[in-house]
Amino acid sequence: MKQSLYQLFSQYGEILEIHCRKSYKMRGQAFIIYKDLNSATTAKHSLNNSIIFGKDMVSLIINF
């Protein structure tokens, strides 16, 4: 799954980390960490409301 997410999201910029858990509470959630904010913003606008792995994608950007 991480490899599929990497292939999909890496077209928008350099990815530092991908977190996806298999626990029941976190099922269906993944966190993609980009090197820069512009890449994250572009990915958010391009992929928001698309269907990924049979689920609607809802994105959120958190800037540290």
Image (cartoon, rainbow, N blue to C red):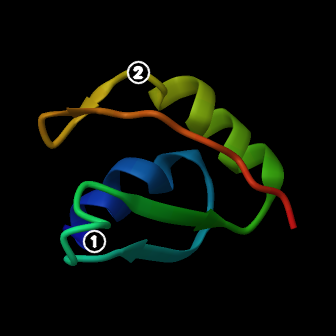
Amino acid at dot 2: Asn
User: Looking at the image, is 11 positioned above or below residue 47?
Assistant: below
Horizontal and vertical percent position of residue 31: 49, 64
Closer to the camera in the image, 60 or 26: 26
Residue at (48, 56) in percent of width and height: 10
User: Looking at the image, is 46 positioned above or below residue 33?
Assistant: above
Residue at (62, 42) in percent of width and height: 60
The quadrant the N terminus occupies is bottom left
Residue behind mark 2: 49
User: Looking at the image, is 51 positioned above or below residue 34?
Assistant: above
Can you tell which mark lies on residue 2? Answer: 1
Residue occupying the far left of the picture: 54
Mark 2 nearby-residue class (10 Å; few <14, some 14–19, many ≥20): few
Residue occupying the far front of the picture: 25
Amino acid at dot 1: Lys
Q: Is residue 39 left or right of residue 45?
A: right
Looking at the rendered structure, the number of numbered marks drawn on it comes to 2
Instruction: Classify mark 2: helix, strand or loop.
Output: loop
Closer to the camera in the image, 61 or 36: 61
